[in-house]
Image (cartoon, rainbow, N blue to C red):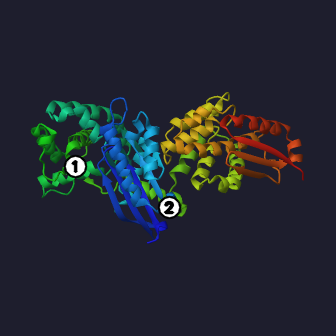
């Protein structure tokens, strides 16, 4: 089987790591292999966000196994995402670098809302009745994603900081299970879910679905307790499960039928989250889906690679909405983008820049002036802040870091520390995109469409040369001065920029 036809989706969750390998057939994906390791990453993180050496070693061992399985699959056909625990690690860059080197593939850290969107995408893809309004609860190890929608894209996508590992550690520390502890945790979760309940009132759902391992484990236990009832998990049977967990008194004493040994250490925290949310959202019954984040990652990857498969593009929708919300000058955004992409296309081979890098540069150019909605003075800093902290469906947290860096450093003196704050593997690419973007911003500063006929961009490892007609430069003294200033500023990034005037 040609490995160019294979795709891999990797979900590095707070409780377990998942790898799904699929083959593309007639535009669809058919799963051919799956690996899963119960790493319990969240359980290895202390209150200061430090990861224990034992869990770190187990995580890297798991990634090494994944690396062997994906060997030979084109890197562009692999997408790995890290979720809530990656987001809260104190020294995330160090562990991320080790993880990427072991996996031999880049890892994107996604936000809670992006995780929720991808969960919905995975579950929706596997549903027969896709038009039915749905409410999905995805209880993971470190967070719970609450998603509601009817079509392909959700209308509500939120993430709550409650997961089976975290809740087990917080409310049942030492393994002790009591009714008092359960009640305290339940009240806290229900209180935090109240704002979501109000949103769900405006978007009525007809079918409730649980995804991820906790939901499937609870459904298996429910079917053992009440085999004659409809498949799934009812709130009344969940109360029976809760009573049996409390009666056990300790995690080590849990003996419920249908519960696997590897799920037993964290089931009490997961059951607590489901009890609180099913009560808060008035869910009488839910079914379990075998699809979750990893499938969403896989289908999202395929649609990025083949736009003809997209029913809708969340990334394009995000950019369009932000440009409208912040009243961006769309004509100017296009000028900057056209200049930058012209340079990109001429140097991409020499600099080994991917189509994904081109898309990020295009996005950064489209949104480079969002900060003008706050103030003209230092607008680039405002733009960087907005792109770093806005909800941007379709973009990972890692991609937002790059976009924010490009926007922040698009003009004035570039601060190398901003680039150094990025994951190490992204720094060289970001610097190269930044050189192209800064030149594009300078060239488009007059906000006119007067371009020379002949423009040449030439690159090598640490140098970029821009060749422009001498006559054009003479007739554009402001642009000529800005380009010469830019050549000096670029030196702060340990790069060299040459501006050459070429005779006709």
Question: What's the residue at 14%, 33% (across, down)?
Answer: 178
Is residue 154 visible from the viewing direction of this image?
A: no
- The foreground one among 409 and 221 is 409
Question: What's the residue at 31%, 46% (across, down)?
Answer: 39
Q: From the top left corner, tell me how far across and down residue 457 is, in percent.
A: 75, 51
Q: Residue 262 carries which label?
A: 1
Judge whether 313 appears above or below 241 on screen: below
Q: From the top left corner, tell me how far across and down residue 60 is, in percent.
A: 37, 47
Q: Residue furthest left?
A: 247
The earlier-in-sequence mark between 1 and 2 is 2
Is residue 346 visible from the viewing direction of this image?
A: yes
Mark 2: few/some/many CA within 10 Å (<14, 14-19, 20+): some
Q: From the top left corner, tell me how far across and down residue 163 is, in percent.
A: 30, 40
Q: Quadrant of residue 297?
A: bottom left
Drawn side of residue 405 relative to residue 261, left or right: right
Mark 1: few/some/many CA within 10 Å (<14, 14-19, 20+): few
Q: Quadrant of residue 244?
A: top left
Judge whether 77 appears above or below 197 on screen: below
- The foreground one among 111 and 432 is 432
- The foreground one among 341 and 55 is 55
How far apart are labels 1 and 2 at the CA level? Answer: 33 Å
Drawn side of residue 48 relative to residue 225, left or right: right
Q: Residue 74 carries which label?
A: 2
Q: From the top left corner, tell me how far across and down residue 106 is, in percent.
A: 48, 50
Question: What's the residue at 54%, 60% (across, down)?
Answer: 307
**Quadrant location of the N terminus in the rendered image:** bottom left
Q: Check disc 1 and report its element: helix, strand or loop.
A: loop
């Amino acid at each position: 089987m040609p490995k160019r036809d294979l795709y891999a989706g990797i979900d590095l969750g707070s409780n377990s790591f998942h790898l799904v390998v699929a083959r593309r057939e007639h535009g669809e994906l058919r799963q051919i292999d799956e690996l899963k390791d119960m790493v319990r990453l969240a359980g290895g993180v202390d209150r200061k966000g430090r990861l224990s050496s034992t869990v770190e070693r187990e995580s890297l061992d798991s990634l090494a196994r994944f690396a062997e399985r994906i060997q030979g699959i084109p890197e562009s056909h692999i997408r790995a995402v890290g979720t809530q625990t990656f987001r809260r690690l104190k020294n995330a860059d160090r562990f991320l670098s080790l993880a990427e080197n072991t996996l031999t593939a880049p890892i994107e850290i996604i936000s809670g809302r992006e995780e929720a969107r991808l969960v919905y995408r995975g579950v929706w893809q596997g549903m027969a009745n896709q038009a039915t309004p749905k409410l999905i609860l995805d209880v993971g190890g470190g967070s719970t994603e609450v998603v509601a929608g009817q079509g392909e894209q959700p209308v509500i996508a939120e993430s709550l900081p409650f997961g089976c590992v975290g809740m087990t550690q917080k409310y049942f520390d030492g393994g002790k299970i009591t009714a008092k502890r359960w009640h305290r945790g339940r009240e806290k979760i229900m209180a935090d879910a109240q704002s979501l309940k109000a949103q769900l009132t405006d978007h009525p759902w007809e079918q409730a679905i649980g995804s991820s391992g906790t939901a499937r484990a609870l459904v298996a236990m429910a079917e053992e307790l009440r085999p004659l009832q409809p498949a799934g998990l009812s709130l009344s049977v969940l109360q029976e499960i809760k009573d049996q967990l409390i009666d056990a008194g300790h995690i080590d004493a849990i003996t419920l039928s249908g519960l696997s040994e590897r799920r037993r250490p964290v089931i009490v925290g997961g059951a607590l989250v489901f009890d609180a949310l099913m009560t808060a959202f008035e869910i009488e019954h839910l079914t379990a889906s075998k699809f979750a984040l990893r499938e969403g990652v896989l289908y999202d990857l395929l649609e990025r690679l083949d736009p003809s498969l997209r029913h809708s593009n969340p990334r394009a929708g995000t950019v369009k909405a932000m440009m409208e919300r912040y009243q961006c000058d769309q004509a100017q955004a296009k000028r900057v983008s056209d200049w930058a992409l012209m340079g990109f296309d001429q140097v991409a081979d020499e600099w080994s820049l991917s189509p994904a890098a081109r898309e990020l540069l295009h996005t950064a150019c489209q949104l480079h002036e969002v900060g003008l909605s706050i103030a003209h003075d230092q607008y680039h800093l405002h733009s960087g802040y907005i792109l770093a902290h806005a909800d941007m469906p379709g973009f990972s947290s890692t991609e937002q870091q790059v976009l924010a860096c490009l926007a922040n450093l698009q003009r004035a003196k570039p601060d190398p520390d901003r680039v150094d704050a990025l994951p190490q593997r992204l720094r060289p690419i970001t610097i190269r995109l930044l050189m192209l973007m800064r030149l594009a911003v300078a060239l488009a500063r007059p906000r006119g469409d007067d371009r020379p006929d002949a423009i040449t961009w030439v690159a090598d490892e640490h140098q970029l040369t821009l060749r422009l007609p001498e006559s054009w430069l003479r007739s554009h003294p402001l642009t000529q001065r800005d380009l010469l200033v830019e050549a000096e500023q670029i030196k702060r990034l340990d790069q060299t920029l040459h501006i050459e005037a070429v005779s006709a």
